[in-house]
Image (cartoon, rainbow, N blue to C red):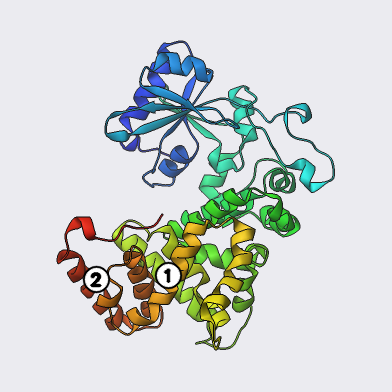
Amino acid sequence: MPLDESAIDPDAARTARRLIRAGHEAYLVGGCVRDLLLGRLPKDFDVATSARPEEVRSIFRASRIIGRRFRLVHVLFPAGKIIEVATFRRTPSAQEGVSHEDDADELIIRSDNAFGTIEEDALRRDFTINALFYDIETREILDFAGGMRDIERRTVRTINDPVLRFREDPVRILRAIKFASKLDLGLHPDLVDAVITTRDSLPLASKMRLFEEVLRLLRGGAARRAIYLAWELGVLHILLPELAVMLDDIDGEDGIPVRIFRLFAELDARTLERGEPPGDAALWTLLLLEPALEACQGASDRLGAFMDFVEPVATRLAVHRRIIDAIRRIMAMLPKLWNGHIAKAARSDVFAEAVAVAEISLAARGEYEAAAQIRKAFLSTRRSRPSSERPNLVR
């Protein structure tokens, strides 16, 4: 399968070649190789090397070592550009931070900083399609885990036993869903069975990592498929039962599940059209919109009802108080925006994200003209105000 070398980032290639000239192994690795093989333009280019972090740091004056659990080197280029360089690693032993006892909690990798060979580095990775290395000098792809076969089959498959890989790091379940959705790939049957077997271990994972991976499901322009897969595999029932139970409610073509999936389809269309997703607070509002509206319906104290609804979600997924407060304010603004009262909300610092939620939710209902009018009024409001007074996006 050909790889478009013209799409390789020249700074990434330069970084790898400089490490090679210094006597080390160095390759492009992971998602950039995968995306190039799939005919996609990679967002980032990473380099894997035999050099230790201190050695990489000594080769590149403009660089810094980051991380504690997983030490990396950021090689710095003009305009804030970064090429990430990681030393080959291996799966740590029990003494180094991972155990293979039957208890699911004991399987989780707590440390991942044991250095190894290129083959060990490949085999410690999560999915075969992420374990490919590209040799800049020989123009060869190094494949130790069958990743090329799965690229050709357009399949997401774990390296080795999927149950063990998900027990080691339950967040890999969400990563599998993300790759299948964003790259339009299928899930290997063994991986699907393993997700169903291990999904109950998701609460053992870092809540902050779960928070970030949920956002990544929404950001990439494939939120509809991601949420559908998470629901179909029972993962959403673990992470967001408030939303999952609404999707379980099958009640015709214009029922709640259809409305929710239209919402994510409109989010995807907007993200792909504009080249970037709305801010994080808007994404979380869209994710929780339907269950939040239901929780507040008919309540005399709508704020109290909203907080009662959102507190368990915030605890389960480590949703920051800043995000919760932004969601609360966006929810309060939506009735005004839906009714076209833009000016009353324009001075809020979540105005831009509230407009994004209003636009997307109206479009999901088929009210495209109303959505367009809100957008037009929003742009007019921004043009008429000094830049120093324009609302900032909450991220």
Is disc 1 in contact with disc 2, using a CB cutoff of under 8 Å? no
**Type of residue at label 1?**
Arg
Q: Determine if residue 381 is in view.
A: yes
The image shows residue 46, relative to residue 301, as above or below, that is above
Q: Secondary structure at mark 2?
A: helix
In terms of depth relative to the viewer, which is nearer, 152 or 163? Answer: 163
Instruction: Quadrant for residue 20, please give it.
Output: top left
In terms of depth relative to the viewer, which is nearer, 274 or 240? Answer: 240
Alpha-carbon span between mark 1 and mark 2: 17 Å
Residue tagged 2: 378
Q: Image check: 217 left or right of 77?
A: right
Residue at (64%, 48%) from the top-left corner?
206
- Mark 1 residue crowding within 10 angstroms, few (<14) / some (14–19) / many (20+): some
The image shows residue 22, relative to residue 216, as above or below, that is above
Residue tagged 1: 329
**Count of labels shown?**
2
Residue at (60%, 66%) from the top-left corner?
311
Q: Image check: 279 left or right of 382?
A: right
Q: Which is closer to the viewer, label 1 or label 2?
A: 1
